[in-house]
Image: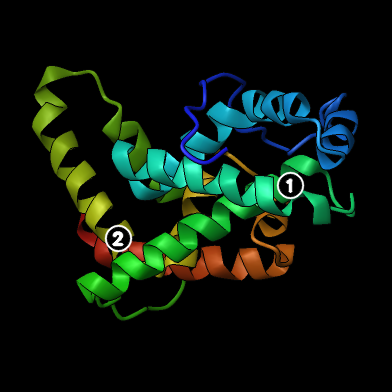
Amino acid sequence: MDGACLELSGNNVAKELPARADDRTLVERAQAGDRAAFDALVRMYDRDVLKLALRMVGSEEEAADLHQEVFLKVYRSLVRFRFQSSFSTWLYRVVTNVCLDHLRRQKRRMEVQSPVVDEDGKTEFFQTVAEERGALDPERTLQAKEIDLRLSSALEALSPRERMVFELRHYEGLKLRAIGAMCGTTEETAKNCLFRATKKLRLALGDLI
């Protein structure tokens, strides 16, 4: 597994983290030492893992490194997986933990200070921002670029977990229950984290509303 070149394949990150039909069989075979079964799991989820890592760190080079780190961790710890959750949920939890650790290290190096929080925030605004970012009207190109830079900067100022939850919810379209499972916490905790992230982002981007 170390240094192996992982082929990109698979579907987008599943919205409800469904169990895939042959997951259990492949996992059980891989736990018994069947390398071909493990390679099949990698091919099944490879693209999902890379896509999520790229979304979180924003750098293709860093995402590729984290992608390799994730599957190395999975390879080493798969024997301890006991099917208390679906394999996909467990795998995405590994991805989120690896990405969170990376973002925390990066944040400590950059010594980024989070903005002061204000009262209530509404999530609908960020859907509007996303629409602006994807605008094709040439007259809006400059404005869209400015919004993109402002939003990226505001996201970097969030705590790693706040950024993780916000991006999983608004860019990947995952539900809070699935996000909580991926982060190893509850739906309510994920909801509170999203609320804090939303307030901070609205404060930082209030003049764009």
Pointer 2 local density, CA inside 10 Å: few below 14, some 14–19, many at least 20: some
Q: Secondary structure at mark 2?
A: helix
| Side of 92 relative to 209 (left or right) | right
**Total residue callouts:** 2
Q: Nearer the viewer, mark 1 or mark 2?
A: 1
Is the C-beta separation of discs 1 and 2 under 8 Å? no
Q: Residue at x 61, y 21 (%)?
A: 11
Q: x%, y% of residue 88?
A: 73, 40
Amino acid type of the residue tagged 2 in the rendering: Glu
Q: How is the image coloured?
A: rainbow
Q: Which mark is residue 114?
A: none
Residue 106 x/y as whole percent: 30, 65
Q: Residue at x 62, y 43 (%)?
A: 174
Q: Quadrant of residue 87?
A: top right
On the question of residue 112 being in view, the answer is: yes
Task: Identify residue for label 2.
Answer: 156
Left or right: 59 in relation to 126: left
Q: CA distance from mark 1 to mark 2?
A: 26 Å
Please state which amino acid type lies under the numbered disc 1.
Thr
Where residue 120 appears, x then y in whole percent? 46, 72
Among the two numbered marks 1 and 2 on one chain, the one whose residue lies closer to the N terminus: 1
Element assignment for label 1:
helix
Q: Look at the picture and state if 136 lies above or below 6.
A: above
User: How many other residues sit within 10 Å of disc 1, few (<14), some (14-19) or many (≥20)?
Assistant: many
Q: Residue at x 36, y 37 (%)?
A: 130
Q: Is residue 73 left or right of residue 140?
A: right
Residue under label 1: 89
